[in-house]
Amino acid sequence: MAIIDISDALAPAKARLVDRIREQIVSGAFPLGARLSDKEIAAEMHVSRTPVREALLQLQSEGLIVVRPRSGTFVFGVSESDLSQICEMRSLFETGALRMAAAVNAASLVGALTYPVAEAALALEDKDYARCEVLDTVFHETLIALSGNKYLVESYRTISTKVRALRSRLPQNHARIANAIAQHRRIIDLVAVGKAEAASAEIASHVRNVRHQLLPVTGGGGSLKAAG
């Protein structure tokens, strides 16, 4: 008779719990820098405290949770310096990915990036800003994936969830999102006409814009809190 490993059987449920807590952080339901209670999370998600603690340990390993001895468990916080360093790394990853992807197959890159931009433009017409942010993530993560460099892709994962969390704290207004979509379109246009270096420069400018828009949210050097 086969022996059933109960821990393996519970693995999908544990993964779902990790995903739910991670999404609460990314979406802003759990503000950055906020103190977390495993008891409250367990009650909210209708589970015992043990799997919640295990999930928080997993998220700590991802850098989304900070445990401070004798103080408690907190969502990660971002200072102005942290924000600058994350954006610097993001710019390096994305400009490098664009150069690699354009060198391999520029037409494929243009095709893959065009869809999320077109969908985002339609979502903007409907004032579906949440959908626009999802498609913004799709645009940038597609660019990384098409680099064809597995080490770059793996390295980008070290900041990708934090990048998503920061993106969700950007101002949710029509003008800001319209400008982001326009800049995405220009990146695609530059790749399409063979100007990969100019497209890379546009990405770097795009990331600098994001950093600038997030600076007021950090409080000029304090921990980043959820906007709104």
Image: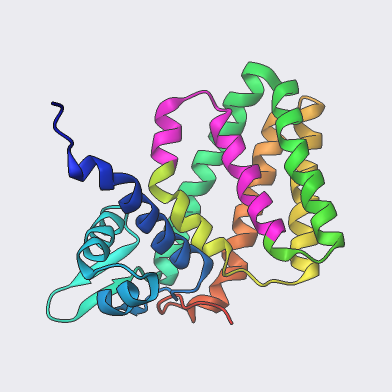
Whether residue 87 is situated above or below residue 6 in the rendered picture: below
Tally the marks: 0
- Percent of width and height locating residue 215: 54, 72
- Farthest residue, direction top: 104
Question: Magenta stretch: dominant SS?
Answer: helix
The image quadrant that residue 67 belongs to is bottom left
Whether residue 109 is situated above or below residue 91 in the rendered picture: above
- Percent of width and height locating residue 208: 60, 57
- Farthest residue, direction right: 125
Left or right of 140 on screen, residue 23: left
- Quarter of the figure that contains the N terminus: top left
Left or right of 77 on screen, residue 176: right
118 within the magenta span: no
Name the residue: 27% across, 65% down: 52
Query: Which color scheme did the rendering employ for the protein?
Result: rainbow
- Percent of width and height locating residue 50: 19, 65
Left or right of 121 on screen, residue 26: left
- Looking at the rendering, the stretch of residues picked out in magenta corresponds to 131-156
Whether residue 216 is situated above or below residue 113 in the rendered picture: below
Name the residue: 48% across, 63% down: 26
The image quadrant that residue 177 belongs to is bottom right
